[in-house]
Image: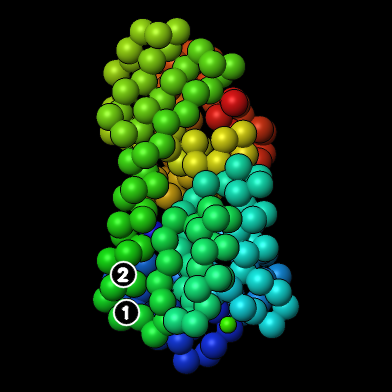
């Protein structure tokens, strides 16, 4: 999983980065809100670990901005024991969980995995002007009310697009995320999967933005 870590304390930031890396995650470490905003846009993280008090502002600004844009990627806030009001504000702003500093690094790993599973499982979206409904909990897709069987790979691809409804996901990010190998179907595995999904769910469900990427039509 790709994790964006926003933390300005060098010791804690380093420890968290090292521990999550050992657990098999890719961690991008931002030390300021501005840096995190940039990495959020360019790095396509799966989960955000958020300190709230940063030199250039509050982590809540980042969280508020994400939720206002319809970005539902999971966010875990990290606060000090005496900052209960921060924690409540964080949860109200749409955080998925919180950790109280100092926390156990093994617990951090467990929480990130739990939040990530939960955010995958709870999601259900409608798209293509309501014609298609995708329930990621039970892996049930319907087109005009009729169930449509999809493969695990197709679900994975749709989930990637559904995390930010209407937002464009870059082609490279999708290929990378889905672990497509260039040799697979002659280097255009992604197009193959997308055309299969279009055959099943209708031509309009995934829009191609030439040279940019793909998006789920809301
Ligand atoms: Ca701080």
Is residue 45 among the parts visible in the rendering? no
Is residue 123 among the parts visible in the rendering? yes
Q: Quadrant of ligand 1?
A: bottom right
- Point out residue 113 in the picture as x, y percentages from the top left corner: 31, 59
Q: Which residue is mark 1?
A: 105
- In the picture, the quarter occupied by the N terminus is bottom left
Residue drawn at x 53%, y 90% as measured from the top left: 10
Q: Secondary structure at mark 1?
A: helix
**Could you say which disc has been placed on residue 115 in the image?**
none
- Point out residue 85 in the picture as x, y percentages from the top left corner: 55, 70
Alpha carbon distance from label 1 to label 2:
6 Å
Name the one closer to the observer, 40 or 74.
74
Q: Which residue is mark 2?
A: 109
Residue drawn at x 62%, y 52% as measured from the top left: 66
Instruction: Say whether residue 81 is left or right of residue 129.
Output: left
Instruction: Say whether residue 114 is left or right of residue 59.
Output: left
Name the one closer to the observer, 132 or 152.
132
């Amino acid at each position: 999983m790709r994790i964006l870590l926003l933390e300005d304390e060098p010791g804690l930031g380093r420890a968290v980065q090292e521990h999550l890396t050992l657990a098999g995650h890719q961690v991008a470490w931002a030390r300021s809100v501005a840096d995190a905003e940039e990495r959020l846009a360019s790095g396509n993280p799966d989960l955000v670990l958020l300190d709230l008090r940063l030199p250039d502002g509050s982590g809540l600004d980042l969280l508020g901005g994400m939720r206002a844009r319809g970005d539902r990627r999971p966010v875990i806030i990290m606060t000090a024991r005496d900052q209960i009001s921060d924690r409540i504000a964080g949860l109200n702003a749409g955080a998925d969980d919180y950790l109280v500093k100092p926390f156990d690094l093994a617990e951090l790993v467990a929480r990130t995995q739990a939040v990530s599973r939960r955010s995958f499982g709870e999601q259900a979206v409608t798209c293509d002007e309501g014609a298609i409904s995708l329930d990621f909990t039970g892996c049930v897709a319907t087109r005009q009310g009729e169930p449509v069987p999809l493969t695990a790979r197709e679900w994975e691809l749709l989930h990637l697009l559904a995390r930010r409804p209407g937002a464009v996901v870059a082609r490279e990010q999708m290929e990378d995320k889905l672990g497509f190998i260039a040799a697979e179907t002659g280097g255009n595995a992604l197009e193959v999967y997308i055309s299969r999904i279009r055959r099943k769910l209708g031509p309009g469900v995934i829009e191609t933005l030439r040279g940019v990427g793909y998006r789920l039509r809301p």
